[in-house]
Amino acid sequence: MTKKIIVTGGAGFIGSALVRHLVLDQAAEVVVIDKMTYAANRANIAAAESTGRCRLLVEDICDQRRMADIIASEAPQQVLHLAAESHVDRSISGPRDFIETNVIGTYSMLEGARSYWSGLDAAEKAAFRFLHVSTDEVYGSLGPGGLFHETTPYDPSSPYSASKAASDHLAKAWFRTYRLPVVVSNCSNNYGPYHFPEKLIPLIILNALEGKDLPVYGDGSNIRDWLYVEDHAHALALIVSKGRPGETYNVGGRNERTNLQVVERICDELDRLVPGDRPRREQIKFVTDRPGHDHRYAIDATKLEDELGWRAQENFETGLAKTVRWYLDNPGWWTPLRKSVYSGERLGLTAPQKA
Ligand code: NAD
């Protein structure tokens, strides 16, 4: 029987990688619920929609009654909840949307799922899964050593990570209190094709190509643990099918890099593929740090690897090479975004930046 799956936020970056994987590789039937904010793009799911097994519903997850109606009428076996406001810098400039979508929206999805699930028979109830997709940023910042484990206490720093932490707690409470079969995943920083160019890697690729400054926050020593988006999508499909209800799974690629290393690597890759007049590293510009900037994130993904057999297929070098190639090959995707949605200006300073 074809699996029916609801994916919220399926027209965004990670959601669309997941939708493409479920529809194109696993022949699932997917209903995408997406409000189509600035971060969404229908082109991201065009290939999935062209199969006839993917439908987009333009809806706001905060509309609890609509969510309950949609879940009841679509009758999915799985709900994968990714819809969120996702950019830390935007959460600093304007936290309200983050609280609404990430907290209230998650509540609304959990309640919609619970109401539908309560009416299922015992076998359908046992098979149903709600996967709440979250971030490693809920754990706060690491010092030079150690890794985030599933048991690491929550200690979020930004309005974004605080709103995600709140939503994780709701998801876990809906399991403990109502026994709704919820699984939570916490993943490190993603990168790859279709990444909206406000995030570090696509922003640097496009600024580098256009001869613009390459802004590096602070001294560039902040460390992130990078995961290629398709590896994350494969992990999510596995976790929702095989993960145990009530459990958390950390997802990460064991690819720690400082931000400066990431930017330099992009410069070198572009110099190799499309040589310019001067090395692109000369475009690097150190700028005022992000307020509350966490120093280091690093994930221990042993539980996911040992229990569910997941392995990342890409390391940072292979994944980044694919990503740079994709942006070079797809100006038709990003040119309109750079022109009319976001052209690369600085976001997320609490006070005006000094020149
Ligand atoms: P994204 O910003 O690219 O996409 C988010 C999607 O959610 C967009 O399509 C947007 O239109 C939709 N959306 C926003 N508000 C909505 C609302 N009220 N109702 C319906 N849809 C709405 O984000 P992403 O990077 O793809 O992240 C997806 C999920 O993964 C998020 O929950 C995020 O917290 C989590 N996550 C992201 C990363 C990362 O590195 N990007 C890492 C770990 C976890």
Image (cartoon, rainbow, N blue to C red):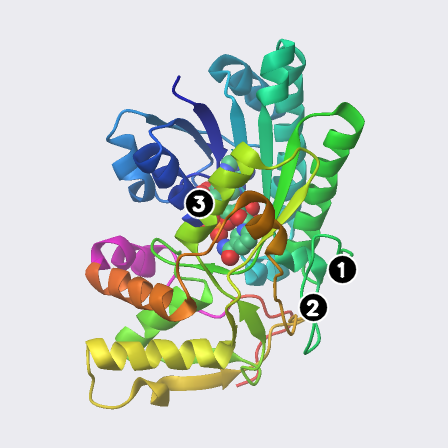
- Percent of width and height locating residue 180: 69, 25
Residue 201, image quadrant: bottom left
Identified at 32% across, 61% down, the residue is: 338
Question: Where 226 falls versus 238 (above or below)?
Answer: below
Give the residue pinned by disc 1. Answer: 155
The part of the chain drawn in magenta is 330-346
Q: Are marks 1 and 2 in contact (CB under 8 Å)?
A: yes
- Percent of width and height locating residue 183: 64, 37
Residue 85 is at least partly visible in this image = no
Q: Is residue 172 left or right of residue 97?
A: right
- Upstream in the sequence, badge 2 or badge 3? 2
- Percent of width and height locating residue 348: 57, 66
Q: Which mark is residue 141?
A: 2
> How many residues crowd around disc 1 within 10 Å: few (fewer than 14), some, or many (20 or more)?
some
- Upstream in the sequence, badge 3 or badge 1? 1
Residue in the foreground of this view, choosing between 131 and 59: 131
> How many residues crowd around disc 2 within 10 Å: few (fewer than 14), some, or many (20 or more)?
many
Identified at 71% across, 59% down, the residue is: 139
Amino acid under disc 3? His
Question: Where 34 falls versus 321 (above or below)?
Answer: above
Give the residue pinned by disc 3. Answer: 234
- Is the shortest distance between ligand 1 and the CB of mark 2 under 8 Å? no
> How many residues crowd around disc 3 within 10 Å: few (fewer than 14), some, or many (20 or more)?
some
Identified at 55% across, 69% down, the residue is: 224
- Is the shortest distance between ligand 1 and the CB of mark 3 under 8 Å? no
Q: Secondary structure at mark 3?
A: helix
